[in-house]
Amino acid sequence: MSQLVQVAGALAILAAFTAAQQGRLDVRGWSYLWLNFAGASVLAFDAWHEQQWGFLLLEAAWAAVSANGLVVRWRSDQAQ
């Protein structure tokens, strides 16, 4: 099951990145930010569960940056 979770999380992040590189997603858009946040959160949880501390650091930081992007986007939308 752990491998399936890892693949799903990685695919979410890679889908967002690929779509952004192809100009199909804005890096400040909801879809991009949610895909990154969800993928990184899943991978961070799995890393924590498997006690993979370096991987946890990377994915937790990725999730935190994505969460910050979501908050910034939400605040921006509220100000309009």
Image (spheres, rainbow, N blue to C red):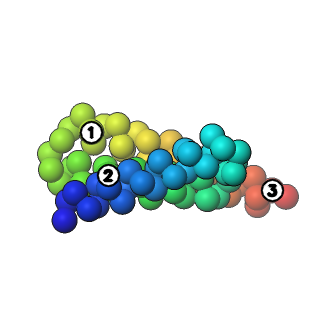
Say whether residue 73 is left or right of residue 6. Answer: right
Mark drawn on residue 79: 3
Answer yes or no: is residue 62 visible.
yes
Q: Are marks 3 and 2 in contact (CB under 8 Å)?
A: no
- Horizontal side, residue 61 vs residue 7: left or right: right
Question: Residue pushed farthest bottom?
Answer: 1
Q: Nearer the viewer, mark 3 or mark 1?
A: 1
Image quadrant for the N terminus?
bottom left
Residue appearing at x 32%, y 55% in the figure: 7
* Residue bearing mark 2: 43
Query: Tag 2 or tag 3, which sits nearer the N-term?
Result: 2
Query: Which residue position holds label 1?
Result: 55
Local packing at callout 2 (Cα closer than 10 Å; few below 14, some 14-19, many 20+) is many
Total number of numbered labels?
A: 3
Residue at image location 69% in from the left, 51% down from the top: 24
Q: Please report contact status of discs 2 and 1: CB closer than 8 Å, yes or no.
A: yes
Q: Nearer the viewer, mark 3 or mark 2?
A: 2
| Residue type at numbered disc 1 | Phe
Secondary structure of the residue carrying tag 1 is helix
Give coordinates of residue 66: x percent, y percent.
Answer: 52, 47
The residue sitting at the front extreme is 22
Q: Give the camera-side residue of 40 and 12.
A: 12
